[in-house]
Image: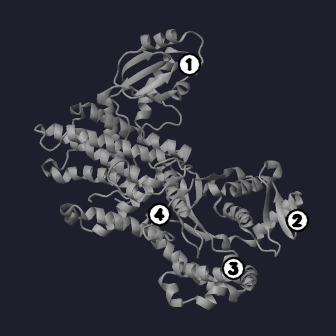
Amino acid sequence: MSATVPAHATAPSPFSIPSDLPPLPHVPGTEPDRCVLDAFRTAIAQLVADALPPLTLEQVYAGVDYGKKGVDFTVAIPRFRLPGKIDELAAKVLSKFQPNEWIESVVHDKAFLHFTLRTPTLMRLVLNQVHALTHDTPSKEPEYGTNTSGAGKRIVIEYSSPNIAKSFHVGHLRSTIIGAFLANLYKACGWEVISMNYLGDWGTQFGLIAVGFEKYGSKEELEKDAIKHLYNVYVKINAEAEQNPEIKVEAAGWFKRMEDGDEAALANWRVWRALSVRKYEEEYARLNVHFDVYTGESEVTKQSQDRALTRLEEMGLIDEHEGAKLVNLEKFKLGKAVIRKKDGTSIYLTRDIGGAQDRFEKYNFDKMIYVVSSQQDLHMAQFLKVLQLLELPWADRLEHVNYGLVLGMSTRKGTAVFLNQIIEEAASVMHNQMRKNEDKYNAIENPEETAQEIGITGVKIQDMAAKRINNYTFNWERMLSFEGDTGPYLQYAHVRVCSITRKNPELLPLPAPSALDTSLLTEPSTREMVFLLGTYPDVVKTALRTHEPSGVVTFAFRLSHAISSAWEAVVVKGEQDVEKARARMWMYLCARDVLGAAMRLLSVKPLERM
């Protein structure tokens, strides 16, 4: 199964609520055909609204929350601010309640009403929905967890954005991982997504590289690995420039020629850029990340930059200082920001402003997100404020999604400078781990590739496990362990649940879902797991609201633990009752499908063997 997330969301769902259940009214914004728990919540809201007029169905629905352990859903009565005592209001709801196919029981506890859903209905609907939205979709792609909230809208997400000829450091890695997650997330919510890599491919350092390339450049090395070679040239010439200020003057002159469009100065730069992009594409592919557009600071038009500067001058927002132009944002507590250097060349704030205008003209987006480190919070705040001051009608469609630092990222040989070093280190550490189990190792078709995939999963999951604004310390041992909540553990959980078909071939092929008897799934651990499967579409919606991958990671671990605790008690192999064994196998396969969906959303490729 591919690790991409489908852009579908306009096709109708292959699942609908069965007609043998009590009919329910529609609550705007809900999609029970994509999230069956929406239907149960509607049943609860209908009961409470009928018992407590003048409450509306929508008002109550918004107050139906997931319950604490042992309770499916909870409603806090005080939130509705109704006249009368809590106990009397609760009594009205209880007197109205009759157990039905949706709700099993209601309990009043202090200020709360706790609801338990009817287990047979829950088991049947959740498993049927997971199956239909994974295997029977018009798009032929798995769609469980997706929704249509963004249908008809377009978003540009700018992420990764390394500098050509400088190291791809771990900050870029975080931006890449979080950005790829956001791109998948918006696709899963029906948006048209344009993934954009805005390369640092312009600026004075290219003048330096041009000077350095004449001295230290090699066409052969450039072809082999442009990123590494240009970096080495840059390091050498930079060290020389520290000793000899003449080099910096020469470099600035060279960059001025580039800005003025001098073909001779641009010819080499074009080759460097093209070869660097080619190399980056290979590395992103290993990370399972794909960009629709590679753009860069070099592509921002001079017209849009000049237009912005002229407008700011007309508005009286520009101060001059020793020939440089600054935009004064002190009254917004954002200081002063340089917008043009004294030699007349642009600086990255100017290019960002021009770039945003160019993008709006080209893509006419409904939203644009910049995934940029919290170290750049001031720059991003200045940039967004300038767009507001320019009174651009789309300025409020831009958003900065930030993240904290990674501390202590290095390989065993020392500091990691390039992305491929990080990937190779993760793969080799993992490969050594895998070799320890000779039998399993020999059963894997492609151990190197598998080791790389598990290693990358370890890097990604460690990165996304906590709130993105938190700094975290990079730890190879912790990250690549199979113990505890790590990437390798998630892959192990997925592989284990995939093994169920290999170990029980006599039960295959399974009958159609309608012929499987879910009422045989009576153990508490099966109910817990199936309820959790039903919550996944909500996990996706919450992530869209918060832009936090950590909620999806937490869900994937909770599901892995639920599979693990059921696995020992609710067995398939050795179960004498064939009907029961088949129902259990189907439940585990649905759990596999949902765990796989969560992993793909996190841009991780779920493995079937390891």
Compared to 545, does 220 lie above or below?
below
Residue at 79%, 48% (x, y): give it: 332
Residue 347 is left or right of residue 519, and the answer is: right
Disc nearer the start of the sequence (4/3): 3
Label 4 sits on residue: 289
Precedes in sequence: disc 4 or disc 2: 4
Three-letter amino acid code of the residue under disc 2: Glu
Q: CA distance from mark 4 to mark 3?
A: 38 Å
In the image, which is nearer the foreground, mark 4 or mark 2? 2
Distance of mark 1 from mark 2, alpha carbons? 58 Å
Who comes first in sequence, dot 3 or dot 2? 3
Q: Assign the C terminus to one quadrant of the image.
A: bottom left
Indicate the position of residue 38 as horizontal and vertical percent values: 44, 33
Residue under label 1: 78
Look at label 1 and name its amino acid.
Pro
Local crowd size for mark 1, using a 10 Å CA cut-off: few (<14), some (14–19), many (≥20): few
Rendered residue at 27%/68% (across/down): 446
Question: Between tags 1 and 3, which lies in front?
Answer: 3
The residue nearer to you, when weighing 465 against 384, is 465
**Residue 525 tag number:** none
For marks 4 and 2, give the CA distance: 43 Å
Label ID, residue 320: 2
Give the class, few, some or many, for how many residues have Cα within 10 Å of label 3's Cα (few <14, many ≥20): few
| Of callouts 1 and 3, the N-terminal one | 1
Q: Spatial distance from mark 4 to mark 1, Cα to Cα?
A: 47 Å
Report the Cα–Cα distance between label 1 and label 3: 68 Å
Check disc 3 and report the residue beneath it. 242
Compared with 159, 540 (above or below) is: above
Circle 3: element type: helix
Q: Picture coordinates of residue 334 (x, y %)?
A: 77, 52
Percent x, y of residue 375: 64, 57
